[in-house]
């Protein structure tokens, strides 16, 4: 007994059976995402990750400003870009004498696809495939002006 699942698009509606869904799952190729390459962070730089809570970064910036840092650079990639912007906006609201400079760009990341094991040829070499994906980046520079 087959169940039918209806998927509605804005243009038209299509029907897929559970057998088609199983075929799509079997075509899935496992992959490994490599970490983005970047230089080691200086004391006044933050590399924002999407998993880390925003309050950790805000506390770190407050500590840097308290310790006398005049320039703080926030780096973010893809999903962490909104978090970088939220951090910068929070700092501008908290400190009235902070200016921001925003640079956007892109970076190449590598995704390795795991090779499929061939049952018929045991001695055949397993080829590893890799894709290069272009990811969006943002660099926000916070500058604290001197108070006289």
Image: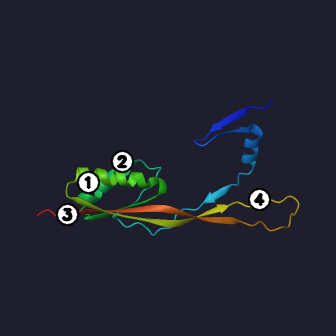
Instruction: List x then y, in percent, for residue 24.
Output: 72, 47
Q: Are marks 3 and 2 in contact (CB under 8 Å)?
A: no
Residue of label 2: 55
**Point 24% across, 50% down: residue:** 94
Q: Quadrant of the N terminus?
A: top right
Question: Gap in Å between the C-alphas at discs 1 and 4?
Answer: 51 Å
Residue 34 percent coordinates (x, y): 58, 62
**Of callouts 3 and 2, the N-terminal one:** 2
Q: Earlier in the sequence, mark 4 or mark 3?
A: 4
**Residue contact between numbered discs 1 and 2, judged by CB atoms under 8 Å:** no
Query: Element at badge 1?
Result: helix
Query: Where is the C terminus found, in terms of image quarters?
Result: bottom left
Disc 4 packing (10 Å; few <14; some 14–19; many ≥20):
few
Q: Which residue is the site of mark 1?
A: 92
Q: Which residue is mark 4?
A: 116
Q: Earlier in the sequence, mark 1 or mark 2?
A: 2
Separation of residues labelled 1 and 3 (CA atoms) = 12 Å
Disc 3 marks which residue? 145
Tell whether label 3 touches label 4 (CB within 8 Å).
no
**How far separated are the C-alphas under marks 1 and 2?**
15 Å
**Left or right, residue 145 beside residue 87:** left
Q: Which structural element holds mark 3?
A: loop
Q: Nearer the viewer, mark 3 or mark 2?
A: 3
Q: Nearer the viewer, residue 2 or 46?
A: 2
The structure residue drawn at horizontal position 69% and vertical position 65%, both measured from the top left corner, is 129
Q: Residue furthest right?
A: 120
Residue 66: assigned label: none
Task: Determine crowd level at label 2: few under 14, some 14-19, many 20+ residues with C-alpha closer than 10 A.
Answer: few
Mark earlier in primary sequence (1, 3): 1
- Cα–Cα span, label 4 and label 2: 43 Å
- Residue at the (71%, 65%) spot, across then down: 128
């Amino acid at each position: 007994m087959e169940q039918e699942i209806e998927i509605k698009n804005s243009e038209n509606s299509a029907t897929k059976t559970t057998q088609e869904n199983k075929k799509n799952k079997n075509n899935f190729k496992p992959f490994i995402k490599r970490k983005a390459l970047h230089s080691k962070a200086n004391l006044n730089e933050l590399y924002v990750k999407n998993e880390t809570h925003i309050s950790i970064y805000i506390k770190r910036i407050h500590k840097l400003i308290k310790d006398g840092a005049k320039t703080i650079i926030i780096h973010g990639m893809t999903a962490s870009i909104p978090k970088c912007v939220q951090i910068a906006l929070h700092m501008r609201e908290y400190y009235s004498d902070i200016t921001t400079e925003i640079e956007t760009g892109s970076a190449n990341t590598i995704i390795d696809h795991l090779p499929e094991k061939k049952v018929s040829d045991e001695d055949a070499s397993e080829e590893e495939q890799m894709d290069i994906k272009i990811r969006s980046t943002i660099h926000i520079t916070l500058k604290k002006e001197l108070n006289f």
